[in-house]
Amino acid sequence: MDIVVCIKRVPATDTTIKIAADGKSIEPAGVSFELNAYDEFALEQALRIKEQLGSGTVTVVTIGSKDAQKELRDTLARGADKAVLLTTDQWVFDGASTAAALAAWIKSVPCNLVLCGRQAVDSDNNQLPANLAARLGFACVTEVAKLELADGTFTAERDIEGAREVVTCKTPAVISCQKGLNEPRYANLKGIMAAKKKPLEEAAASLPAPALEIVSLTLPPARAAGKILGTGVDAVPALIAALRDEAKVL
């Protein structure tokens, strides 16, 4: 089975974000980047499927600047067979244009299954998997928390409001992966050394005009300073009054 895993290089969740001078993007200087956390589940699942079948290929693809080679090398060290960087200097935030560029590339290679994370933690719009599946003409199951393969058919479980939904799906398909699907592996020394000999290809990304426009970015307001109402049991009446009259939670 030929599996494609779509990943994204995103700002680390613990990094300090500053808004760029244009007011519509983030300032990359001083920001640390990492592999999108949800994409780690997708990569791990692809590797497990390949191991289960005893054959096949796992190809990782991303759209971004040349700096994304770092995250692609990480996926190769974890066990992917090949990595592809679709290069662009644009900040890619729109699910529709991203799906269009990825679909154009995926159609050019052998592919039975596309795995991707539930969403990217920077844009957080959860639009790519379904949009990509529609453009490819593949079946689609999103936010999968459990996945099993038997006789060429996937059985997927996903959480819905108040219940867990179980669906079956044949390939070709796009599946987005939720936290808890698996425990992603880390790269070991052997994998890091092997990654140096694995192919990492580059090609220009064919990005159409974005369907979504960012008008402005603003940081959340600063938190108000904390207030000490007293100490011990004598502070209880003051706390209750503050919760009732100021916070309006009682």
Image (cartoon, rainbow, N blue to C red):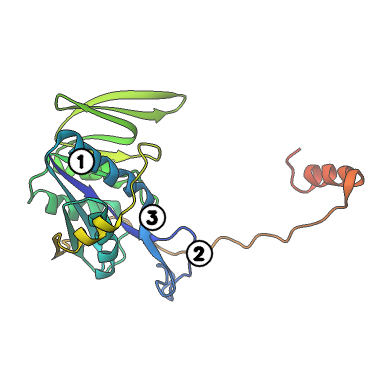
Residue pointed to by mark 3: 123
Mark 1, other Cα within 10 Å: few <14 / some 14–19 / many ≥20: many
Camera sees residue 183: yes
Cα–Cα gap, marks 3 and 2: 14 Å
Camera sees residue 207: no
Amino acid under label 3? Ser
Q: Quadrant of residue 46?
A: top left
**Residue 119 percent coordinates (x, y):** 35, 47
Amino acid under label 2? Thr
Q: Earlier in the sequence, mark 1 or mark 2?
A: 1
Residue pointed to by mark 2: 218
Q: Earlier in the sequence, mark 3 or mark 1?
A: 3
- Secondary structure under tag 2 reads loop
- Secondary structure under tag 1 reads helix
Q: Could you tell me if the residues under marks 1 and 2 are in contact, i.e. CB atoms within 8 Å?
A: no
Mark 2, other Cα within 10 Å: few <14 / some 14–19 / many ≥20: few
**Residue 225 percent coordinates (x, y):** 73, 61
Cα–Cα gap, marks 3 and 1: 19 Å
Q: Quadrant of the N terminus?
A: top left
**Residue 192 percent coordinates (x, y):** 26, 60
Q: How many marks?
A: 3
Using the image, determine if residue 228 lies above or below residue 182: below
Left or right: 219 as drawn, with respect to 73: right
Amino acid under label 1? Ala
Cα–Cα gap, marks 1 and 2: 32 Å
Residue pointed to by mark 1: 133
Q: What residue is shown at x 50% (from left), y 66% (from top)?
A: 16
Residue situated in front as seen by the camera: 237 or 131: 237
Q: What residue is shown at x 33% (from left), y 44% (from top)?
A: 41
Q: What residue is shown at x 34% (from left), y 43% (from top)?
A: 118
